[in-house]
Amino acid sequence: MQIITNNELETKQLAVKIAGYLKPSMTILLEGQLGAGKTAFTKGIAKGLGIQRIIKSPTYTLIREYTEGRLPLYHMDLYRLEHAENEDLGLEEYFYGKGVSVVEWGSFMKEELPKDYLMIRFNVLNDSGKRELIIEAHGEPYQEILKELKQ
Ligand SMILES: Nc1ncnc2c1ncn2[C@@H]1O[C@H](COP(=O)(O)OP(=O)(O)OP(=O)(O)O)[C@@H](O)[C@H]1O
Ligand SMILES: [Mg+2]
């Protein structure tokens, strides 16, 4: 599925909508270059889950946990792992826990990613704010979300 957003607000609005369909232990992988909009999207997920706290990019912490919403949100940014040996990060407890995991730069983690997930690829179309979002569902529960989005 392909969606064009024209600005940050539209990306957040899409994320708010997706947040409404999320269930415990679901994972969203976000891919795309620096500044593509992955964190902006995560802010929309947080808003949709009813999280009021300001979402900061967890670049120096790997993971931030927000527990005051409809579901806990685990926001991971694995960018720092690019040059690291990453063996056992112990992230399974998040992926298979009560909350929703949103992962920036998941491709930098070689192991441990769940088998099923929603993958969103961000392509920067121009400097003025146009982004192409390619959404892919891996696994039945995620295909349901895509179906809902298409309606
Ligand atoms: N359509 C759009 N969707 C999302 N963000 C947009 C859009 N158009 C412009 N922007 C701007 O692009 C920037 C996206 O920054 P953001 O931190 O979300 O990127 P990122 O993908 O998380 O980057 P990084 O890999 O560095 O974490 C913001 O400054 C935002 O205002
Ligand atoms: Mg980011």
Image: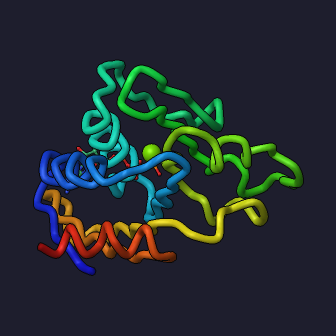
Q: Is residue 36 above or below residue 97?
A: below
Is residue 62 rendered to the left or right of residue 131? right
Q: Is residue 26 above or below residue 118?
A: above
Question: In terms of depth relative to the viewer, which is nearer, 14 or 144?
Answer: 144
Pick out the residue farthest to the bottom: 1
Question: What percent of the width, then of the height, locates residue 24?
Answer: 50, 46
Q: Residue at x 13, y 58 (%)?
A: 128
The quarter holding residue 135 reads bottom left
* Image quadrant containing the N terminus: bottom left
Q: Residue at x 30, y 48 (%)?
A: 19
State how the image is colored: rainbow
Total marks placed: 0
Question: In terms of depth relative to the viewer, which is nearer, 126 or 63?
Answer: 63
Q: Is residue 37 above or below residue 72?
A: below
The quarter holding residue 141 reads bottom left
Q: Residue at x 73, y 45 (%)?
A: 91
* Image quadrant containing the C terminus: bottom left
Is residue 30 rendered to the left or right of residue 15? right
Q: Is residue 40 above or below residue 125?
A: above
Q: Residue at x 42, y 75 (%)?
A: 137
Question: What percent of the width, then of the height, locates residue 37?
Answer: 33, 52
Question: What percent of the width, then of the height, locates residue 54?
Answer: 35, 22
Question: In terms of depth relative to the viewer, which is nearer, 95 or 119?
Answer: 95
Question: In terms of depth relative to the viewer, which is nearer, 61 or 128?
Answer: 61
Is residue 122 rendered to the left or right of residue 29? left
Is residue 150 rendered to the left or right of residue 101? left
